Structure formats: structure tokens, C-alpha cells
């Protein structure tokens, strides 16, 4: 398995470094660098207290945490949030509270999102008059149904 080394600048020394919760996890846990309260249906840009230097050929993707989504209705507005390799500012998560009745409190240090680093090849688009045929064809949204 390939290891990608990424320099991390701590902007909040009190926070733990992003880390995997378990061996084999794809996402590194990102923590809140501030306290916040999200009212029902409110969205908020929450600082994660770090900046990173992703190497060219890779990108970072900020994703929701499934436990927060299932238990509290907390998600990320632009999921996945994209971090390009040339960005050097602070990592932030645009959280949204999709619970219609309850506010959600975020405390400094809470795990609020996860960061996945993926290889991203340079793509060259080539204009074509026709595309190759596939079994799916132009079938899109819902074309495979809900039952097997």
C-alpha cells in the first residue's frame, strides 16, 4: 500500500492532529477549532484548525461523518468539499443541520467531518461525434430501480 506524506500546519495547537479512528479507515477525522451551535436547517462554516500541502496529482475531499448524519442530521452542504493541491489556507467544513426540530452543539475538539486524500489524474478531454455503447447507455437518475 502506498503512503502519501502530507505536510500539516497546525493553526490551533490545542487540537489533535487529524487521524484515522481504525486501521483500514479511508477518512482522517477533522476536528472543530471553535464552538458553534447549528439551529435547525442552519449552515455554518466551521474551522478545522489546520492547513495542509496536498501534493500535485492528489486532492482532498471533506466528507460528512456517518454517525453525525444518522444520529443528528448533520451533513456537509457541498459534500464532498474539494481541496485542490494548490490550496494552502485553513481547512473548513460547511456543516448543515438537517434536523427540523433540534439544534446541534459543536464543541472545540469535536470530530465534525472526515478528510479523504485521493489521486487525481490530469484529464485531457477529446471531442467526439459518437460515444461507445454500454448496457446502461443514457439511463440516468433512477434507471436501475430500487429493487433487485
Image: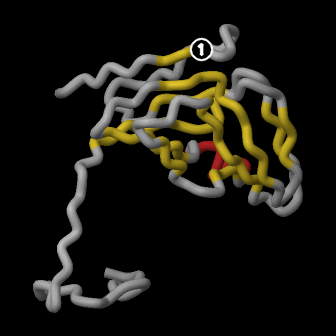
Q: Is residue 50 left or right of residue 12?
A: left
Q: Is residue 88 visible?
A: yes
Looking at the image, residue 84 sits to the left or right of residue 24; the answer is: right
Q: Position of residue 63 (x, y in %)?
A: 52, 46
Q: Is residue 44 left or right of residue 94?
A: right
**Quadrant in the picture for the C terminus:** bottom left
Seen at 40% across and 37% down, the residue is 85
Residue drawn 59% across the image and 38% down it: 113
Q: Answer with the quarter of the image where residue 136 lies.
A: bottom left
Q: Quadrant of the N terminus?
A: top left
Question: Can residue 145 be seen by looking at this rendering?
Answer: no
Q: Is residue 89 above or below residue 76?
A: above
Q: Is residue 16 above or below residue 101?
A: above
Taking the image as shown, residue 132 lies to the left or right of residue 59, namely: left
Please, is residue 4 above or below residue 146 in the view?
above
Residue 58 vs residue 31, the one in the foreground: 58
Indicate the position of residue 66 as horizontal and vertical percent values. 56, 46
At a point 66% along the width and 8% down the height, the residue shown is: 13
- Residue under pointer 1: 10
Amino acid at each position: 500500500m502506498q503512503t502519501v506524506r502530507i505536510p500539516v500546519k497546525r493553526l490551533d495547537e490545542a487540537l489533535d492532529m487529524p487521524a484515522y479512528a481504525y486501521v483500514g479507515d479511508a477518512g482522517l477525522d477533522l476536528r472543530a477549532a471553535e464552538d458553534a451551535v447549528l439551529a435547525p436547517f442552519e449552515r455554518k462554516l466551521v474551522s478545522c484548525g489546520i492547513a495542509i500541502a496536498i501534493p500535485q496529482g492528489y486532492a482532498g475531499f471533506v466528507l460528512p461523518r456517518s454517525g453525525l448524519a444518522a444520529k443528528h442530521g448533520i451533513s456537509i452542504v457541498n459534500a464532498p468539499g474539494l481541496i485542490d493541491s494548490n490550496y494552502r489556507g485553513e481547512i473548513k467544513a460547511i456543516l448543515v443541520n438537517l434536523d427540523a426540530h433540534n439544534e446541534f452543539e459543536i464543541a472545540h475538539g469535536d470530530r465534525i467531518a472526515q478528510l479523504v486524500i485521493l489521486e487525481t489524474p490530469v484529464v485531457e478531454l477529446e471531442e467526439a461525434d459518437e460515444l461507445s455503447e454500454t448496457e446502461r447507455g443514457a439511463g440516468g437518475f433512477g434507471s436501475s430501480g430500487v429493487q433487485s
